[in-house]
Amino acid sequence: MILSRTTFLAAIVAAIFVGLMLGGAKGQASRPPAPRPSGPPRPYVRLSPAHDFKKNNAVVHVLTRRRRVAMTFDDGPDPRWTPRFLDLLRRYDARATFFDIGRHVQSYPDLVRREAGEKHEVANHTYNHSPLTMLPIEEIRHQVDAGADAIAATGVPRPTLFRPPRGYFDKRVGQAVADANETMVDWDRPMDPMIRRNGAHRAAQVVLRHITQGGIILAHDGSLHPHRTFTATRLILRGLAKRGYEVVTVSELLGIDSGRRAPAWLINSPAQLTGIEPPLDDILLLP
C-alpha cells in the first residue's frame, strides 16, 4: 500500500517527537542532583524587612557581615551557677543575654544587677516559666508583664527582649509580647539536646561545626545538667575565640543599641525550629 504524502510527513514528525522525548528523559536521568542549599533553609525560615519584628514572629538568626554571634542563657539567675558563667564570660571577654525568670529575679536581685553591671543583657523569660500556649490570654499577658516588672524592680533597664519557655509560642503569645513592646527571640543553635544525648564535648563540637555569623546559641545557667552545660560553654567560647568570632548580646547582634535594626531570619511557629537546628542524625553521626 502506498502512503499518501501527508501521511508520510506526519509519520516522520511523530518519529522525531518521540526521539526528542526519549533523549530528554535520558538526559534528565543522567543529570547529577542539585546541591543542597547551605544555611537556614528558606522553606522553614523567612527573611524579614528590618522593622517587621513585632508581628507574632521570633528572631532566630541575624543577617550580619561581621563575625558575631549571640550567646544566651535561660532560666536563671541561679545562685550556684550564674556566678560561674559570669566569671567564664569575663575570661573570654564575651557578652551574653540572660533570659531570666521573674520569681528567680526576685530571689536573687544582686545577681541580676551583676549581669547588667558586667555589660550583659537582662531579658524577660516570664514570671514563673509557665507553658504560655496552654494559658488564657489574660494569664499570658500577666506572665510577660510580671517578668518584666520583676527585672525593672532590681534597678536594671526594663527588658526589650522576650523568650517564651521552651521556645513555644502562638499568635496570642506573639501579640502579648508585641503589646509589651518586646521582641521575641528563639535560637538557631541549641546546646541542651546534644548535652542530654551526647555529652558536653559532642555538644560543643556540633555547635561549633554549624555556627555561622549572626547565630544565636541557646544555653541554660539554670539547668538540669549544669556541669555539662558549663563545660560545653567553655569549649564553645574557646572555639569561637579561635575562629575570630565576637560574642555579643542579642541586642548588639540586632543593632538595637545603634538605633538601626538589622534584618533577621524569623519564624512564626516554634515547629519551624526543626528547619534550622542541626538534625538529630547529624548529631549522632558526627565522627
Image (cartoon, helix red, strand yellow):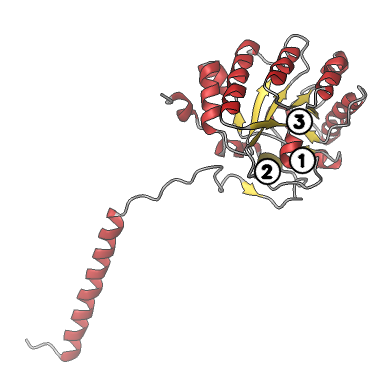
Judged from the image, the secondary structure of the residue bearing numbered disc 2 is loop
Q: Are marks 1 and 2 in contact (CB under 8 Å)?
A: yes
Image-based side of 205 in relation to 217, left or right: left
Q: Residue at x 54, y 45 (%)?
A: 41
The Cα atoms of the two marked residues, 3 and 1, are separated by 10 Å
Judged from the image, the secondary structure of the residue bearing numbered disc 3 is helix
Camera-side mark, 3 or 2: 2
The first of marks 3 and 2 along the sequence is: 3
Q: Residue at x 78, y 26 (%)?
A: 120
> How many residues crowd mark 1 within 10 Å: few (<14), some (14–19), many (20+)?
many
Location of residue 285 by image quarter: top left
The Cα atoms of the two marked residues, 3 and 2, are separated by 15 Å
Report the amino acid beneath label 3. Answer: Leu
Q: Residue at x 31, y 58 (%)?
A: 28
The first of marks 3 and 1 along the sequence is: 3
- Asked if residue 51 is positioned above or below residue 1 in the image, the reply reads above
Horizontal and vertical percent for residue 35?
41, 47
- What is the residue that sits farthest to the bottom in this orientation? 5
Residue that numbered label 2 is attached to: 268
Q: Which mark is residue 174?
A: 1
Q: Which mark is residue 120?
A: none
- What is the residue that sits farthest to the top in this orientation? 80
